Image: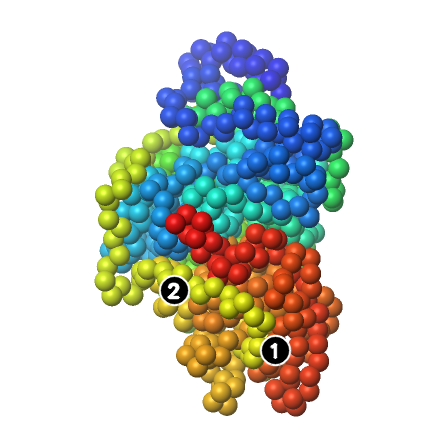
């Protein structure tokens, strides 16, 4: 939380100290960081970046006084309610977990893979420019193979039609365009656009990264982004709030990453669903802004709607160092808006003592399998895992701050001095050109390369399966450690037998020097070049660079236009990668009859399982072609096989997309029956678009992940949830169902599913519920949310 007196006294003190500091080369880092605040770098144009605090606080005052009768509010509520489209609509009150909020976001950010579908949909909305500032970031389509420059060049060639399409759309609609190699969406947003108290939508599930700068930033599908860009109220159910009080301060080996790795173990991948994670307490003031961004980023791993931190000294410093002092000062003036009210009630309350959190290692295959490092060697032995680390990967949008890198370099320097080399591949992914250039200027890159590390492009690369791996055989069982955020099976290298563990950059670095999964740098020694035992000293590093951030390659600065209606959006004819969208058909107005269960999915079914990334990323702009990956990672409960279902029309087994397409061609609509948290993971709306495109009008599950449930609704697919989850057991592939209650669908009203077993003709009924609001029911009736927008606009 911001302490103005403390900050100003430090500034005063520092302005006196500064002349002394400048004459000394070895300066305590905390003084140097603050000194650079006094001597701040040239300012960016903050006009579009500064939240409209006056309007927001007026809105909030109206909601809090007139509607909520002066009830104390959490920070997330303050930010959300101040962004209500029309606060007067809520005179019946706002109830967390119940009321649908219609919001007006301040900004939209899109990454290149999801931007394609977002733009294709926005083109149908008929707008001349976007209604709010927006940005496109080319980061997902760059394969990690030969190193930064070669990989970016290769991507520019292989993805030329996609980048040309996005750039032309950006020019037409006035969207900032960040070229390949400029950086990863969330790091660029943190460095340029995030602002305390703002509301942003991003077409990527780790958009909450900006919560480290006090912004409510929410990952959504492209159709939601289209709402904001088309000036349509964006709707979300008022989230519940998990209050997390931080006490103490992190010990030397622990980092902000360990806070969220620890919390993921407590909350599990579903624990945050429908909730915002809101941090507060004295421990917040001990964290860097970028550290809070890491924690916010990975709130997505527990299914949280978003994460937010209150305005703090470190946010002020970071804003100023990234040339947004105007935003810092405006936030400071509105500091009371940027923290929770006292005596606020949280739906859940968690208290963490940072001093007690030790480094954690989470995985494999799920981010909530959390083990403190002191117990990890036991876990390795108990599971009989080979005690070897094949690759260590650090960086990405989650962990490539200056602080992360300087702490890593402090460890790499020790290894270099002792002649110790990494025992496997060691890759470093800078999050942005600004970080890359600053690392290079400050000698960090040189040390990392001398020690055997390879700097990859400022892009997602191995984090999203864009890793051309040459150090193992196909499907070889092996273990890797990453400081990324997500570790579902196949995620990094498309090898189902790669065990992927998540840890802080510091722990990943020490473990790649050890080459062993069982290594604990806090207690274990390595052998140096002279045969002597060597123990790492704990890492240390600077929160912000002493000389400010370096600008980097000016060719990678964004292309900014105000919009140009004469620009033609380039979609090559007969492209296999881009295809104009056709609107989906409206609902036929009757109950559904003769729907066939295509597959009953067992267990975890993430958006990676429903619409795989890796090699499929190239078809993100071509719905027909990418639909060939639909559900190829799903486990069929009937035969315990992945991507194998019986085609009930031919009696033969086939893969899921092939059979779905066969049903579509034969006018047989089909459904999916799914387990818990169906669609967890990313904001990938293809997972909804594809099933809709292939002929699926409804899905029944034990529960849905939030973003995916919304994505389904947006695309006109009805997400139904078993009232009694045991009913899941009654279904199998090939069953025929019909609905009772879709005609006359209303919020809160159940839908009955009549089932006819395909083997026995036995019939029965089950009850399902749904979370469709009145507006969402209109989307369903119109065939999609976009159809409704287009209908209203033309
Ligand atoms: Fe890219 Fe990975 Fe970050 Fe997603 S999580 S934006 S894939 S670096």
Q: Residue at x 62, y 38 (%)?
A: 89
Q: Nearer the viewer, residue 772 or 529?
A: 772
Residue 215 position, x and y percent, is: 54, 36
Q: Residue at x 56, y 28 (%)?
A: 56
Is the residue indicated by label 1 positioned so its CB lies within 8 Å of ligand 1? no
Residue 62 in view, yes or no: yes
Residue 655 position, x and y percent, is: 46, 79
Q: Nearer the viewer, residue 443 or 493?
A: 493
Q: Disc 2 designates what residue?
A: 623
Quarter of image, res 309: top right
Assess disc 2: are there few (<14), some (14-19) or many (≥20) residues with their C-alpha within 10 Å of its C-alpha: many
Q: Disc 1 designates what residue?
A: 737
Q: Residue at x 59, y 71 (%)?
A: 591
For mark 2, give the secondary structure.
helix
Residue 515 in view, yes or no: no
Q: Mark 2 near mark 1, Cβ–Cβ under 8 Å?
A: no
The mark lying in front, picked from 2 and 1, is: 1
Total marks shown come to: 2
Assess disc 1: are there few (<14), some (14-19) or many (≥20) residues with their C-alpha within 10 Å of its C-alpha: many
Q: Residue at x 57, y 64 (%)?
A: 718
Quarter of image, res 556: top left
Is 144 situated above or below 742?
Answer: above
Residue 470 position, x and y percent, is: 37, 64
Left or right relative to 467: residue 401:
right
Q: Earlier in the sequence, mark 2 or mark 1?
A: 2
Left or right relative to 177: residue 691:
right
Q: Quadrant of the N terminus?
A: top right
Residue 177 position, x and y percent, is: 33, 42
Q: Where residue 415 is drawn, which disc sits there?
A: none
Label 2 and label 1: CA atoms lie apart by 27 Å
């Amino acid at each position: 939380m911001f302490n103005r007196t403390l900050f100003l006294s430090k500034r005063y003190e520092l302005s006196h100290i500064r002349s002394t500091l400048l004459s000394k080369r070895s300066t305590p880092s905390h003084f140097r960081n603050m000194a650079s605040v006094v001597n701040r770098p040239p300012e960016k144009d903050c006009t579009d970046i500064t939240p409209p605090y006056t309007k927001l606080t007026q809105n909030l005052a109206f909601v809090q006084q007139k509607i909520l009768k002066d009830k104390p509010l959490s920070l997330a509520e303050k930010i959300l309610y101040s962004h209500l489209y029309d606060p007067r609509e809520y005179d019946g009150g706002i109830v967390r977990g119940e009321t649908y909020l219609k919001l007006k976001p301040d900004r939209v950010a899109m990454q290149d893979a999801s931007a394609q579908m977002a733009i294709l949909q926005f083109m149908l909305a008929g707008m001349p420019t976007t209604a709010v500032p927006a940005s496109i970031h080319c980061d997902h389509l760059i394969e990690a193979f030969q190193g930064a420059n070669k990989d970016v060049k290769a991507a520019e060639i292989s993805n030329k039609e996609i980048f040309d399409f996005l750039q032309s759309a950006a020019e037409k609609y006035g969207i900032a365009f960040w070229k390949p190699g400029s950086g990863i969406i969330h790091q660029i947003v943190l460095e340029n656009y995030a602002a305390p108290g703002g509301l942003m939508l991003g077409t990527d599930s780790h958009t909450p990264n900006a919560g480290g700068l006090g912004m409510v930033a929410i990952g959504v599908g492209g159709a939601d982004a289209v709402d904001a860009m088309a000036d349509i109220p964006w709707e979300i159910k008022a989230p519940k709030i998990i209050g997390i009080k931080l006490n103490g301060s992190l010990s030397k080996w622990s980092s902000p990453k360990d806070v969220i790795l620890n919390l993921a173990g407590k909350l599990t991948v579903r624990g945050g669903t429908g909730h915002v994670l809101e941090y507060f307490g004295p421990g917040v003031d001990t964290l860097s802004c970028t550290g809070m961004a890491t924690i916010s980023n990975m709130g997505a791993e527990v299914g949280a709607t978003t994460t937010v931190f209150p305005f703090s000294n470190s946010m002020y410093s970071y804003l100023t160092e990234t040339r947004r002092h105007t935003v810092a000062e405006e936030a400071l003036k509105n500091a009371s808006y940027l923290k929770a009210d006292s005596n606020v009630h949280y739906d859940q309350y968690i208290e963490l003592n940072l001093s007690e959190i030790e480094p954690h290692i989470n995985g494999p295959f799920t981010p909530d399998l959390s083990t403190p490092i002191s117990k990890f060697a036991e876990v390795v032995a108990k599971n009989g895992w080979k005690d070897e680390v094949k690759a260590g990967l650090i960086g990405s949008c989650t962990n490539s701050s200056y602080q992360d890198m300087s702490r890593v370099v402090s460890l790499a320097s020790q290894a270099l001095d002792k002649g110790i080399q990494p025992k496997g591949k060691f890759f470093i992914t800078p999050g942005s050109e600004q970080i890359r250039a600053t690392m290079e200027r400050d000698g960090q890159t040189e040390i990392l390369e001398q020690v055997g590390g390879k700097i990859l492009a400022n892009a997602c690369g191995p984090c999203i399966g864009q890793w051309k791996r040459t150090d193992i055989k196909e499907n070889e069982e092996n273990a890797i450690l990453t400081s990324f955020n997500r570790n579902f099976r196949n995620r990094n290298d498309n090898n189902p037998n790669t065990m992927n563990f998540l840890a802080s950059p510091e722990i990943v670095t020490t473990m790649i020097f050890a080459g062993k999964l069982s290594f604990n740098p806090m207690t274990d020694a390595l052998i140096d070049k002279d045969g002597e035992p060597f123990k790492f000293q704990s890492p240390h590093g600077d929160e912000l660079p002493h000389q400010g951030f370096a600008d980097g390659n000016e060719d990678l600065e964004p292309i900014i236009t105000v919009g140009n209606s004469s620009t033609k959006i380039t979609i090559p004819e007969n492209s296999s990668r881009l295809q104009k969208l056709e609107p989906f058909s409206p609902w036929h107005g009757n109950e559904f009859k003769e729907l066939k269960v295509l597959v009953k999915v067992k267990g975890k079914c993430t958006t990676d399982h429903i619409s795989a990334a890796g090699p499929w990323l190239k078809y993100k702009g071509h719905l027909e072609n990418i639909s060939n990956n639909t559900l190829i990672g799903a486990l069929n409960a009937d035969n315990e096989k992945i991507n194998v279902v019986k085609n009930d029309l031919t009696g033969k087994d086939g893969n899921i997309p092939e059979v779905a397409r066969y049903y579509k061609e034969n006018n047989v609509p089909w459904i999916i029956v799914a387990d818990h948290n169906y669609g967890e993971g990313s904001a990938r709306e293809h997972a909804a678009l594809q099933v809709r495109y292939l002929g699926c009008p409804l899905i029944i599950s034990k529960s849905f992940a939030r973003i995916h449930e919304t994505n389904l609704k947006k695309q006109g697919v009805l997400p139904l949830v078993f009232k009694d989850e045991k009913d899941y057991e009654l279904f199998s592939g090939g069953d025929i169902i019909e609905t009772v209650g879709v005609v006359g669908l209303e919020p809160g009203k159940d839908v009955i599913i009549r089932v006819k077993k395909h083997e026995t003709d036995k019939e029965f009924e089950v009850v399902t519920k749904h979370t469709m609001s009145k507006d969402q029911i209109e989307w369903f009736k119109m065939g999609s949310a976009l159809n409704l927008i287009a209908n209203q606009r033309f």
